Amino acid sequence: MAKKELATGNWQPATGNWGERCRRKWTSRHYVSVGVGLLVLLVIGAFIGEIRAPHFFLRSNQSGDDVHIKLDLELDESDTDTVEKMQLQKEESTSPFSVLSVGEQEQEVTDVYDDMNAWNKIWDIAGLLHAVKNEKKGNHTHGTQFVGPTKLNVTLISQDDGILSKLTARELFETFPSPAGADTVQIYNEKAYHELIQTFMTTKTNITICANGGSVTAGGGHINFDSRYYTKLTNSIRELNLNSAGGAVRNVGRGHGTRHSLHSAVFAPNFFPQYTDLLLWEFSINDYGYHIPEESIIEQERSLLIAWLSEVEKMRPQNNPPKVIMIYLWSAPFEFTDHQRVSNPVYDAHAQLAKEFDFVVGHVNVASYFDELRMKENDLKQLFLADAHHPSAAGHLSIAFLLLDLIRGKGSGGKAGSERRKGTDVDLPSQHLHRSMYKWFCGTESEAKKFVQSQVVEYGDGDDGIFSRWRSPLGTATLETPRNDVLPGTRQMFFDFASSEMQILGKQDPLRMDRQGSTALSCCTAGASTSDYTTVKVPENAEPIQNARSIYFGFGPGLSDVKDLKVYIDSDKEHVNGKLINVGDEEWKCFWSWKDVYDPMWFAFTEERTEISSIRICVENDRCDEEQELSEAMLISIAVY
């Protein structure tokens, strides 16, 4: 059976004028013939399960600069060799991609082929779309393959924040030299990468990018919303038309100063939007164990990430969590190591731990990128930092540039990170490269520590022996903002009081999004109605919390004056029996001390509670002894275990 060539055409490569070549080489006849051929192939695909979508192949002409688009296929629907024929065609091509339709109006890319080498220049695909659409408008369009400079464009990047916030994606690639090493940009899981690109290019509704991190994400350093890295990323995705199916790209900032991955893991339902397509992790400054003993600092930093990724894994049903990209920055304060490299201890400790989770796309490492720039420490600080550790507007641009470079497909050819980053001061034992378990590092020398360990770590028997893993809370509530709206079925609870009863603690930089809301707990006053006490509930029509054993309380630092605490469940008139457990900084040399985050306490029920729909809380302290209605114990967050 003879092959039939459905369409051929010549395209100017990305460095030329695509719109002009479109005008000269492609006519209505070409578009119609391609559309007819594509329709035939779609029919064939309906009968052949192995074909996900018809493929065009973009390949270089060795005899010149033109790029040809060609599709060869058997027209017989029953031909069992069709798949093999297409595979042979694929092997001859250098950049395969899939299309849904090619017609008079537009060309729409809707799927990607699982060949990483073909996706090193995803901008070529976006450029193809722009060329066709702009041609119909009579506009001239240039190619979108960005060839970066060999050195940083210091003059441009030194402009004021207002100018930097308006830089286009093209200008970013004309400003920053391409990263060279796998430490700087690396794709961990190719399948996750392709699924992310497919989401961008096929989604016709909302595409949500959530940035979860510390004060950098919140805008620390007086960085306004338009200049933050995730805003620039979403703007560039729209600009490059990577959302080619028309999906509305939106970003959600979930940044909280002085918070680490453990904080977001415990309160994940409050901070991770339920329907997130791409989740950005930015905790490398905050996850460093500044107060952790040297002998356990690496393992503790790794366990923070395991807890966070474990919660991400639970975000969606059917084993379909959002895709994750890790953003590594530096330690605080920003400084060089003895090897004249930017100090980056959390990246060194992780040793690409996130590779173990198949929904993690990869990482970008700004500290490693700064090493590649080979600039002096003071020059880096002056250009990329707003203060001792927060990035400036130029620093945020460097993060956005590296994220775009990863989405572009860079980092796919790099080798896996070694156990020791060249020039680092940290040696990593070989067992760090195997599947990791969540562990307890606070000790077991007291009954209090043993109890808390039993709440947050789950132990069991597996194929390789005894395992330990992260145990999620049964329900959580927080007054910190920004946070999600409360939805039934998400393990969220809410404080039931008037908004006027909430007080803001800590810094209140008007440009930053994070606020530490808190409420003064009620005093246990004789004769008072329990309905007047501080109340936390599950949402209306939500299932009660089942089999609770304890409640974790996060008070404002220095604002936890509590002699005793009473808890009333649902409509009970009597408070439940239990024991109040204090967590002291000096005794708890681990992240569960919540140093600089909360004054933590636990309330352990004497007996397991079968169901909980509401919790009412009152306290006793010196202020309450003076017959005041409110204590000075300022509660920020709770978690039920």
Image: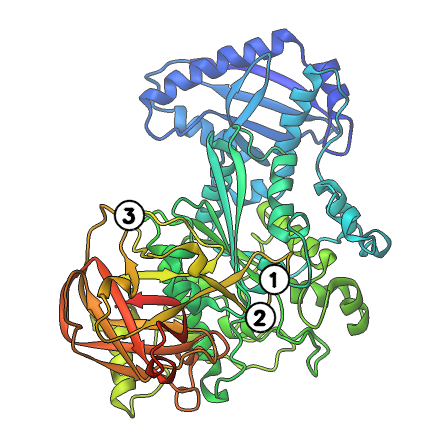
Q: Earlier in the sequence, mark 3 or mark 1?
A: 1
Residue at the spot of label 2:
285
Q: Are marks 1 and 2 in contact (CB under 8 Å)?
A: yes
Q: Residues within 10 Å of mark 1 (few under 14, many from 20)?
A: many
Q: Earlier in the sequence, mark 3 or mark 2?
A: 2
For the residues carrying marks 3 and 1, which lies nearer the camera in this image? 3
Per the model, the C-alpha gap separating discs 3 and 2 is: 33 Å
Q: Residues within 10 Å of mark 3 (few under 14, many from 20)?
A: few
Q: Earlier in the sequence, mark 1 or mark 2?
A: 1
Residue at screen point 38% across, 62% down: 267
Residue at the spot of label 1:
216
Q: Is residue 331 above or below residue 120?
A: below
The residue type indicated by label 1 comes to: Val
Q: Residue furthest right?
A: 155
Q: Residues within 10 Å of mark 2 (few under 14, many from 20)?
A: many
Question: Residue 488: which disc?
Answer: 3
For the residues carrying marks 3 and 2, which lies nearer the camera in this image? 3
The residue type indicated by label 2 comes to: Ile
Per the model, the C-alpha gap separating discs 3 and 1 is: 31 Å
Secondary structure of the residue carrying tag 2 is loop
The residue type indicated by label 3 comes to: Pro
The front one of 334 and 90 is: 334
Residue at screen point 23% across, 59% down: 614
For the residues carrying marks 1 and 2, which lies nearer the camera in this image? 1
Q: Is residue 152 above or below residue 139?
A: below
315 left or right, relative to 459: right
Residue at screen point 45% across, 14% down: 39
Residue 179 falls in image quadrant:
bottom right
**Residue 373, image x, y percentages:** 76, 63
